[in-house]
Image: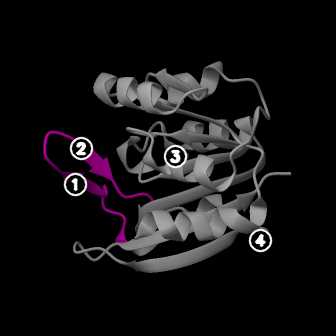
């Protein structure tokens, strides 16, 4: 359901290029390509099997293997109209979070679109969650957005954290 919501946000933006951090097997990128066949799609993921699958099933897409922050740092400034993060920043530690947001903003020429689990300032107590083999963090995004940004509360997760979509205008 959240991918349809992301596509509804992307639709009026009519992107010519999208970079998806943590693209996994490329499902969201496939949806972008289906809607905009000429859109330059690219992404990265740390899981070799996911990268291999995406490379095999998204001809012409640039799918890179590596951590989100390392890959973003390799990309030229303003190289994609939209940088997309769907539940990826939850895997970025609080120490690396500001750098990851800065890199998303640097690489995007128009928008950063984030669909992330979120906590608010008074709920921040480390914000760490242990899942199957991975640590996840819940970040407070509100101090990092500005008055030009659009925030869409989506609903609450079973842990009581708000899932939020943020569309941040870069240009």
Whole-angstrom CA distance, mark 1 to mark 4, is 30 Å
Sequence-first disc among 1 and 2 = 1
The residue that disc 4 covers is 147
Relative placement, left or right, of 99 versus 167 is left
Q: How is the image coloured?
A: one colour
Whole-angstrom CA distance, mark 1 to mark 3, is 30 Å
The residue that disc 1 covers is 129
22 relative to 14, above or below: above
Relative placement, left or right, of 111 versus 64 is right
Residue 164 image point, x, y percent: 49, 70
Sequence-first disc among 4 and 3 = 3
The residue that disc 2 covers is 135
Sequence-first disc among 2 and 4 = 2
Magenta segment: does it hold 128? yes
For label 4, the crowd category at 10 Å Cα-Cα, with few meaning under 14, some 14 to 19 and many 20 or more, is: few
145 relative to 153, above or below: above
Q: How many marks?
A: 4
Q: Residue at x 64, y 35 (%)?
A: 103
Relative placement, left or right, of 33 versus 77 is left
Residue 95 image point, x, y percent: 44, 38
Quarter of the image with the N terminus is bottom left
Q: Residue at x 27, y 77 (%)?
A: 160
The residue that disc 3 covers is 30
Whole-angstrom CA distance, mark 2 to mark 4, is 31 Å
In magenta, the rendered stretch is: 123-139
Q: Residue at x 64, y 56 (%)?
A: 35
* Front: mark 1 or 3: 3
């Amino acid at each position: 359901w959240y991918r349809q919501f992301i596509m509804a946000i992307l639709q009026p933006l009519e992107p010519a290029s999208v970079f998806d951090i943590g693209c996994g097997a490329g499902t969201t990128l496939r949806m972008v390509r289906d809607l905009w066949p000429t859109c330059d799609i690219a992404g990265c993921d740390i899981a070799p099997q996911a990268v291999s699958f995406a490379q095999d099933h998204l001809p012409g897409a640039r799918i890179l293997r590596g951590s989100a922050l390392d890959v973003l740092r390799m990309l030229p400034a303003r190289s994609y109209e939209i940088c997309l993060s769907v539940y990826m920043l939850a895997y970025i530690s609080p120490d690396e979070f500001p750098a990851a947001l800065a890199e998303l903003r640097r690489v995007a020429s128009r928008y950063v679109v984030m669909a992330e689990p979120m906590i608010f300032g008074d709920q921040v107590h480390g914000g760490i969650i242990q899942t199957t083999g991975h640590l996840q963090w819940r970040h407070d995004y509100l101090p990092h957005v500005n008055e030009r940004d659009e925030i869409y509360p989506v609903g609450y997760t079973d842990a009581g954290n708000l899932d939020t979509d943020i569309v941040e205008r870069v240009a």
